[in-house]
Amino acid sequence: MQISQEEILQVAKLARLEVRGDELKNMTEQLDRILSYIAKLNELNTDGVTPTTHAISIHNAFREDTTQDSLPRQEALVNAPEQNGEFFVVPKVI
């Protein structure tokens, strides 16, 4: 077994989660299967395999940065629920 119920309880305590008896048993079994699978994957020889960050090759899809005029103030404020002619009026936070 890769992980014990005590380890599950310790992690749950750190995460401030309550784990009940039936949940503890299921979680232990599921995490043990996951860790066993990872251990099996770690047995593979990956020498010479280039690490990948995406399943398919991705290139920068961003547009070029260009400057442009901003929206005129009155046009920006026209649909505001509340405004004072210069700014959006929002509830006071403090």
Image (cartoon, grey):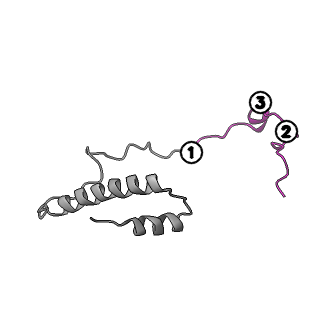
**Residue nearest the viewer, comparing 5 with 34:** 5
Residue 23 locus on image (x, y percent):
45, 53
Amino acid type shown at disc 3: Asn
Residue 87 forms part of the magenta stretch: yes
Q: Secondary structure at mark 1?
A: loop
**Residue nearest the viewer, comparing 61 with 38:** 38
Q: Quadrant of residue 8?
A: bottom left
Main SS of the magenta part reads: loop
Nearer-N-terminus badge (1/3): 1
Residue 25 forms part of the magenta stretch: no
Residue behind mark 2: 83
Q: Secondary structure at mark 2?
A: loop
Q: Which mark is residue 79?
A: 3
Q: Quadrant of residue 90?
A: top right
- The crowding category of the residue bearing disc 1, from other C-alpha atoms within 10 Å (few below 14, some 14 to 19, many at least 20), is few
Image: 82 above or below 58: above
Give the alpha-carbon distance from disc 1 to disc 3, as whole Å: 25 Å
Q: Which residues are magenta?
A: 67-94
Amino acid type shown at disc 2: Gln
For the point 88% across and 40% down, which residue is it?
84
- The crowding category of the residue bearing disc 2, from other C-alpha atoms within 10 Å (few below 14, some 14 to 19, many at least 20), is few
Residue behind mark 1: 67
For the point 76% across and 38% down, which residue is it?
73
Q: Quadrant of residue 93?
A: bottom right
**Extreme residue toward the right, this view:** 84
